[in-house]
Amino acid sequence: MYENIFTSTGFGGTGSSAIIDILGEFSNGKSLGDNELWFLQEKNTISDLEYHLIDGNHRSRVDKAIKNFFKYVKKEGHNYNKVFNNNFENFSNDYIKSLIDANFRKPLVRGDLDSNLLDFLYFKLYYSLVYKTRRFLLKNNFEFYPFSFFVRKYYSVPDRERFYKKTQEYTSRLFNSIISDNQSYFLAIDQLVPANKIERYFNYVSNLKVFLVDRDPRDLYLLNKRNWNNSAPYICDTSNVTQFIIWYKTMRSEINLYKNIENVCFIQFEDLVYEYEVTLKKIYKFTGLSQDKHISKFSKFDPDQSRLNTKLWINEKKHKNELNEIENKLSDFCFG
């Protein structure tokens, strides 16, 4: 059983995996390495469930949210089962069933069909044709419903306390299924939570601590321009520097808030490279890990190697005008 869950997150290309690599060098925990787990934040997963079941509870949207979660589990089950020792699908289905208050049969209605073609055939053709034919033949005005197909419907109105309790039980089952060593102090996971609205996710996982990693905007801009062929899927398109600046700053609108939250540790990626030992002490203090357990230092993260992809703006000539604009507009985020 783990004592702590450590996760690292960033804004796309900012180096969050470096923290997971460092944590993988300790002897008293387990790191999932390159495996990113998105089942708390991805579309149709836990965060969406909280909204649809609690904040925006509506009878049709609740049913849809529950069914979308079932679909997500079925679709991603194969990948996640590899991480959770073949327990992801079973534990996930147990979890969502524990939140369902009622399930019943109900005639098919608009919104139940994901296919536009089926929606057209059933509601535009069949339903309308039968209804109009009966009205014409019987010449009556009473309410009439044609023969309908029935579907299974789900409803749930959990209060927030119940939702969080069931969710934490669920995530604990999953994470404990990974660890075979009863002495493990921590489990390290990349991208378990997003870099925005972090506080929401402390309700889903017990004993969670989050590293928030950011990177100099000039390097991020040049990396996408020069190394990633302007097509990195996790950051803004850099063909327009003005839009890049707006995107970069907007994404970080809450960053100062998280620099002052107890269970969030802000790390500047460049500090890991140029102030490695100082930043390492910061990691020790935040996690409670001791130096004597850091037995494989530099085996997974080498600051000298990472240095090659930093301070790219120095002596850059081709994109000098864009870099000047970034420095002027995003000076608070520029390293040094």
Image: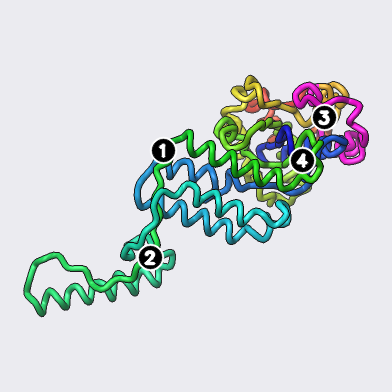
Q: Is residue 225 magenta?
A: no
Identified by mark 2, the residue type is Val
Q: Secondary structure at mark 2?
A: strand
Q: Return the residue at label 2.
A: 151
User: Is tag 4's residue or tag 2's residue first in the polypeptide sequence?
Assistant: 4
Contact between marks 1 and 4 (CB within 8 A): the answer is no
Q: Nearer the viewer, residue 321 or 184?
A: 184
Q: Where in the figure is residue 83, as x and y percent of width and height?
A: 72, 52
From the viewer's perspective, is residue 127 above or below residue 243? Answer: below
Identified by mark 3, the residue type is Leu
Rounded to the nearest whole Å, what is the CA distance between mark 1 and mark 3? 40 Å
Rounded to the nearest whole Å, what is the CA distance between mark 1 and mark 2? 25 Å
Instruction: Tell me the residue at 62%/36% (across/down).
Output: 205
User: Is tag 1's residue or tag 3's residue first in the polypeptide sequence?
Assistant: 1
Mark 3 or 4: the one toward you: 4
Mark 4 or 2: the one toward you: 2
Q: Return the residue at label 4.
A: 17
Q: Is residue 292 magenta?
A: yes
Q: Where in the figure is residue 77, as x and y percent of width and height?
A: 63, 58
233 sits to left or right of 222: left
Q: Where in the figure is residue 279, as x and y percent of width and height?
A: 82, 24
Q: Return the residue at label 1.
A: 55
109 sits to left or right of 290: left
Q: Where in the figure is residue 294, as x and y percent of width and height?
A: 89, 31
Rounded to the nearest whole Å, what is the CA distance between mark 4 and mark 2? 44 Å
Q: Which mark is residue 272?
A: 3
